[in-house]
Every structure is written in structure tokens, then in C-alpha cells.
Image (cartoon, helix red, strand yellow):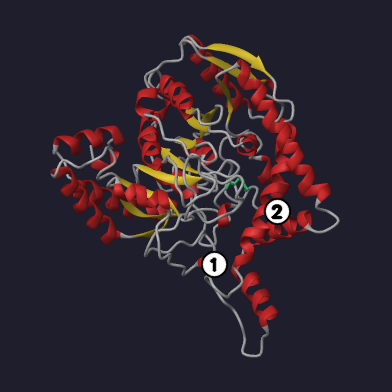
Amino acid sequence: MELHELSMGEAIELLEKGEISSVDLTKSLLERIQATEPLIHAYLKVDRDQALSQAEKADEMRAKGRGTRLTGIPCGIKDVLCTEGITTTCGSRILENFVPPFDATLVGNLKKAGAVILGKQNMDEFAMGSSCENSAFGPTRNPWDLNAIPGGSSGGSAASVSACSSFFSIGTDTGGSIRQPASHCGVVGLKPTYGRVSRFGLVAYASSLDQAGPLARTVADAADVLQVIAGHDPQDSTSAPKEAPDYQSALLKGVKSLKLGVPKEYFVEGTDPEVEEAVKNAISHLESLGAELVPVSLPHTEYALPTYYIVAPAEASSNLARYDGVRYGLSVRDPEDDLKDMYKKTRTTGFGPEVLRRIMLGTYALSAGYYDAYYGKACQVRTLIKQDFEKCFKEVDAIVCPVAPTPAFDIGQKVDDPMQMYLSDIFTLAVNMAGLPGLSLPCGVSAGNRPIGLQIMAPHFAEETLLTVGHAFESTTDHHQKRPSLKAA
Ligand code: GLN
């Protein structure tokens, strides 16, 4: 067995015993990246020298007895999180050469814990998309089937964990971007509660929804990563002043006393029959482990999609106003141009079509005369969605349902049809609208060899419940052990 094939838990054990070094592990992962990148294109930038020097430091940390569980473990970071001295492009031409002068807080926390950062991972431009096809630097491919999308927007992060070219990755989830690609690539993705993980240094898409979290090969691995990145950050005014509990101890609690809600609105026509079957089997399995299943209703679910596609573009149109050619990234101007010409040329050259579409949608929704009808109304509906969950969580501890209505679709299949693309987010958006935590974990593979995910949702700051349910499922099934064979198409 090669080192990159170890589970993260096994790698930690060998590092702790001193049987392998982080430098060995990092070299093995760098080789794996070289072998898999021509097929999947999960990384936008690999920093070999920095990774190896961090690995050396990690080995020293362990030798001095100052190691944490993540010390020496190689990982990847979605290219929307600032990394000091390494380009942070957000998958966009407009930031192609942007090198941040600081680390995002969570990147700094990972470094302090001794994790080794291999590089930056591909994504839909500014995290807008569900297939990773909106990257200005070419799509990522799904390691299970190179003709399939890996999901998005954290497509590079999910594909890399699945292809074993990183032990874990950090993605972000504004409307499903951790959970949906995790589901399509057969890995675990955890979207923490809004405010649980610092957003300082996360380039903003929709600030009231964005949240960063781990993608990993097992629920236990995700717990280890969450432990390091969760917690209050005075530099992010939206981060919650709450200490993170011990997530590893949540893993072993078992589901015996838990009530799991099964929402009827998530089992509707239009869902692929293979997805429905795999998810229903997974839910029955949880029942056989002792959980009590309770039919529940989230009546405003159907409004999550239209509401999200008002709120997120509105916030994006405001956040993306800063890319005007003056301070950040690309600047396009001819000698005779005035300021307005420069803004226009920079933005039309620098942004791709989906980003431009959302800026226009969002600007319209916020404009005088339309604000109340669109943005104001969407905020009201958002409250109703949140109240559905509050009511539901009075009865149950967690909710179980599909992550996405279909397994991964083909590259090119939906890219010219934004409505179809938006519909692939139908089961993930409500969690973000309500600020809740959500977990996606593998629960099957379709006849066409494309993975299927189970989604678990929990009340605010109840990540422990997600980990309990997820680990109970995982430790009694083998879906998470299946890996793609990754052969050239
Ligand atoms: N697919 C959704 C969108 O395009 C969600 C993206 C995300 O979570 N960043 O907006």
C-alpha cells in the first residue's frame, strides 16, 4: 500500500508512532498529485517547496512532543481562502495574479496545528456554480468518471480528497458547495453552523450565507479538522463567541436515543430513483441501529431555491463591486480611458458569464423600486424557512434526506442552462438560508458508477449530532471505503 492510500486516521497513527515522517507522507502526496492532475485538474496551484518545508517543521513539532492530530497531514485549500504568499484566484481571471499578504484565520489555525498545505484547489468562479465548470481555469473532472462533473463549487477540493491527492480539504458552502461535491465524489463534507468557523480571509460571495468547512474521507477525519478550525475569531464579527466542544467524543455516542426527522418535501417527484433508493436504505439502516424515524414537514422548502437566487446574487453584486481595477487584481485600461471606461473594461474582461449574470440579477433585486418586491420579500421568506426548521427541531434531533436530486451529471450537460444548474441545489439551499450545519456522506453508488450522498441536518451549533449520526452510519457500512479506480477515459 502506498502512503497516499492510507486513511487519515492510519496516517496519524503511523506519524504518532514515528514509523513514517511527514516529509515521506508529503512526498507521496506530491507524487500522487503529479499522477492524477492530468486526469482531474483538482488543483490550481501546488506549492511543493512550501509543503515540504512545512512537513519538515511538522516532523520537528512531533519530535519535540508538540504535535496535534493534524501535525504533518497534507491537505488542500479551496482557492477562495487567502493564503499568505500563494495566489488566491477564486477561479477568476480578475484575481489571476492576486497574492494575499495574510492567511485566512482558518488557514493560520491549520498551520499552527502543523497541517501541511499542498496547494490551492479549483472551484467555480467566486463559488458560483454547482459543477466546477465555471472556473476560468478549466473544469475539474470527477475521479469516479472523467466525463462527469465533480460538483461545485468546491469541486477541486472534493475531487482531490476522492482521488487521494490530499487527506482532507477545506471548502466553502454558501448554498451547498461543500455537501453537493462531497456527495458527487463519494467523500464526506461538513458545512458548519454559520458563525462556527471564522470567515476572516474567506473572499466573500454572499456574506450572510458563506461558511467554510472540511471535506474528508471519513466522518472522524472531518471531526479532527473541524476541531482545529472551529471557534471564535475577534477578526470576524459574525463568528460566534462560543468555544468548540470535543468533537471526537461525539463520534461514539451512537444513535439509539436519537429521533431523526424524514421530511416529505425532500422525497418528491423529479428525484432520481437510484438516489431515492440509496437514501431510503441509508435511513432504514439508521433505524436498524436504534434511531427513531419521525415523518416531518418543512412546508417552505419549495421557496428555498427562488429565495436563495435573490439573496445570494444581491449580496454578491455588492461584494464584487470592489473588483474595479483600482485595488485588486486585473486592471484593463487604454491611455485615453476615463475611470468609468476602466471599470467597464476590467469587469467585462475579468468576470466570466455566470458571475456577470449574478451581478446583474443582484443589482436588479436591490435597485430602487424593486428592493421591496425582491430582496425585502426574499428576506421575509427566509425567516419562514428558518421557522420551519425551528419547529421541526422541537420534535427531532436531526433531519435525514438526499444531498442532490441526481448523481453527478455529465460535463457540458447543464452549463448552458442556468435554470437546470440551479435546480441541482434544491436540497442543499435551505440549510444555508437557516444558517444550520449539514453533513453529506457516501451512502451508495449508481449503476453508472457515480456516488450518492446522504444529507444530515441539525440545529444551530449541533455539529456533534451530525458527527454522531454520520459515524454510526459509517462504522456499520462500507460506502466510505469505496474509492474510484481513476483510469483515463
Ligand atoms: N451552487 C450554488 C450557487 O451556485 C451554491 C454555491 C455555493 O455554495 N458556493 O450559488
Lateral position of residue 170 relative to residue 165, left or right: right
Amino acid type of disc 1?
Arg
- Foreground pick, 275 / 47: 47
Q: Is residue 472 above or below residue 147?
A: above
Lateral position of residue 21 relative to residue 407, left or right: left
Q: Which residue is mark 2?
A: 314
Badge 2 element: helix
Q: Nearer the viewer, mark 1 or mark 2?
A: 2
Q: Earlier in the sequence, mark 1 or mark 2?
A: 1
Residue shown at 66% from the left, 70% from the top: 348
Q: Residue furthest right?
A: 369
Quadrant location of residue 482? top left
x and y percent of residue 211 in the render? 53, 44
Q: Which residue is mark 1?
A: 93
Q: Quadrant of the N terminus?
A: top left
Quadrant location of residue 66? top left
Q: Is residue 176 visible?
A: yes
Residue shown at 71% from the left, 35% from the top: 383
Amino acid type of disc 2?
Ala
x and y percent of residue 233 in the render? 44, 47
x and y percent of residue 46 in the render? 35, 58
Q: Is residue 156 above or below residue 455?
A: below
- Foreground pick, 318 / 241: 241
What's the distance in space between the residues labelled 1 and 2, CA to CA? 22 Å
